[in-house]
Amino acid sequence: MFHTILIANRGEIAVRVITTARAMGIRTVAVYSDADRDALHVALADQAVHIGGPAPRDSYLRGDRIIEAARTSGAQAIHPGYGFLSENPEFVDAVEGAGLTFIGPSAAAIRAMGLKDAAKSLMQEAGVPVVPGYHGENQDPEHLAGAADAIGYPVLIKAVAGGGGKGMRRVERPQDFNEALESAKGEAATAFGNETVLIEKYVEKPRHIEVQVFGDGTSAVHLFERDCSLQRRHQKVIEEAPAPGMTEAMRAAMGQAAVRAAEAIGYKGAGTVEFIVDGARGLRTDGFWFMEMNTRLQVEHPVTEAITGVDLVEWQLRVAAGEALPARQQDLTITGHAFEARLYAEDVPAGFLPATGTLDHLHFPPGARIDSGIRRGDTISPWYDPMIAKVITRGPTRAVALARLRAALEGAQIAGSVTNRDFLGALTRHAGFAAGDVDTGLIARDIDSLTAAPATPVETVALAALATRAEGDAKSLAGFTLWEPHWQRVVLQDGETTYDCTLARLPDGGIGIRIDGAELRGERRGGAWWINGGKATGEACVTGGRVSVFGARTVHFTLIDPLAVEADTGAAGGVILAPMPGLVKAVFVAVGDTVEKGTRLAVLEAMKMEHTLAAGRDGVIGEVLVEAGAQVEAGAALIVLEEIDD
């Protein structure tokens, strides 16, 4: 067994590997960029080596620096985590060329599965069913459009390299094909350095079910399936294991197909074989097709660990050190059900845009496994994926596991950045998802109800107002004016709504609260606030100039100085602002152009995704303040849109 390993990654996966390595008595070496000097994975590792600037290309994608860090630190092996260099065969060759062990598959196996078109051909030869489509080398747009016509709409354009939904576009009509193709190729070139795409038939009610495999280079086993159908823009949101409605016949057929795929390429280590499943007729052995194989550990691996009792990272280390498979297929069983929700710093009302911020408050309730690389006080960097944590729950049944996930999300408290916490909570309460009736289109169909922000109850405003007074300390409200309580003013803002509140300590010891004409009474009982005789739902905390109330819904109030004069925002609606820090990938307009509402104005690249900025109304381009290649901060003015002269 290795005595020291280096982890060529960051964040929660680096922390995850460190945890298992430490339990096995193995020393760990972390690597870090300028942006990660104070990161959790750096603090937890036995040793840490600086490898460059904040941009991944200057640090976590610098294989030469990572290998040198391993050699100088005395590490014998490198664990790649996922993302970055984890599926880069040239990096594997370089690691082994330096006399080190790569904790993962061979370079040949990664190459075999690295391009989706070649992988599908290989899988067909191995007897694994594949989706109808065009996987050829001819990338002429006219030829690809013809292939789409032959396959039949709707079709899916997919980058042959990479994953995560990047370089992927669904096309419903022939007239939309060329624009979607151009967009997919551009995103693929940015993300993977390879703009080649393939065309596949789009399954109308698709489910995304993947099988965890593990090999020793000769033989392989499967650790059953995960259902990853709950997706938004091809990005997984909540995963579960096992898949709802799975039959023993279907599980055996998919498991055997996944094992054939792994053994066909001499796979070593943990990998995932992804299948698209036709859910329109239920789960049938003739209704699943190979999509791709991820030749690494998956983000959602904890749900497999939860139902099998297997530590997949431990297995990776043992097999990489030369051991045989730790278990036979007949030794592996499923116990219970598990869910994983991906908690991100992202602005859901703004279209799920990645967000940044310093986490002034961070708390998770007991009862759930939390995989995270973030601590209270840490800053969400614009350079990397904005994941805060993975929330994993398990139960004897699906219903119990889902109830525990709902409770864990509602008990999570995050302040300092907007998050998708409430959106995830809404998904756990979705009737169709609760019944196991899920496919990849569920979120898109019900996006309005899932993201709707209900009116803020006056009790929530009252709880926030109480928290501003020494976090609810009634003593801070003491004082009388003549024979009347002394009322103190608190002004809170929630989006476009401002609440003018006053509070005072009443003669009977309670707290009087007046909010825009409404009168309430608060009192402290048993360490909790009671408002108008009922126990307040949620908890509040004050961080800086903000008050956050946590419960089934999170409300972040801005604390306004009552003496401040509200600034006139002017005609800001005519200025297109950068919604987040990023790189201006393209600008499509020039001064004097007349545009209609919805016209593409520019493309901003941030956090590994492209975001199109469109005109919110008809107008004339008055100024273009940036050019392609510019790096901009959140809120930077990019384009001025003027009214059309009559």
Image (cartoon, helix red, strand yellow):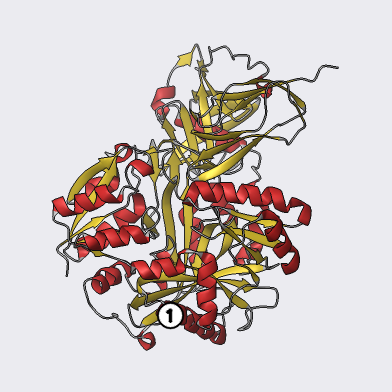
Task: List x then y, in percent, for residue 241.
Answer: 48, 71
Instruction: Give the secondary structure at mark 1.
Output: helix
Q: How many marks?
A: 1
Give the farthest residue toward the right: 646
Instruction: Provide the residue designation for mark 1.
Output: 264
- Name the quadrant containing residue 357: top left
In the foreground, 330 or 155: 155
Q: Can residue 364 be seen here?
A: yes
- Name the quadrant containing residue 198: bottom right
Q: Residue at x 26, y 74 (%)?
A: 319
Q: Of the residues shown, which amino acid type is indicated by label 1? A: Ala
Task: List x then y, in percent, for residue 290.
Answer: 55, 73
Q: Residue at x 73, y 62 (%)?
A: 146
Q: Residue at x 78, y 52 (%)?
A: 175
Left or right of residue 237: residue 73:
left
Q: Can residue 152 be seen here?
A: no
Q: Residues within 10 Å of mark 1 (few under 14, many from 20)?
A: some
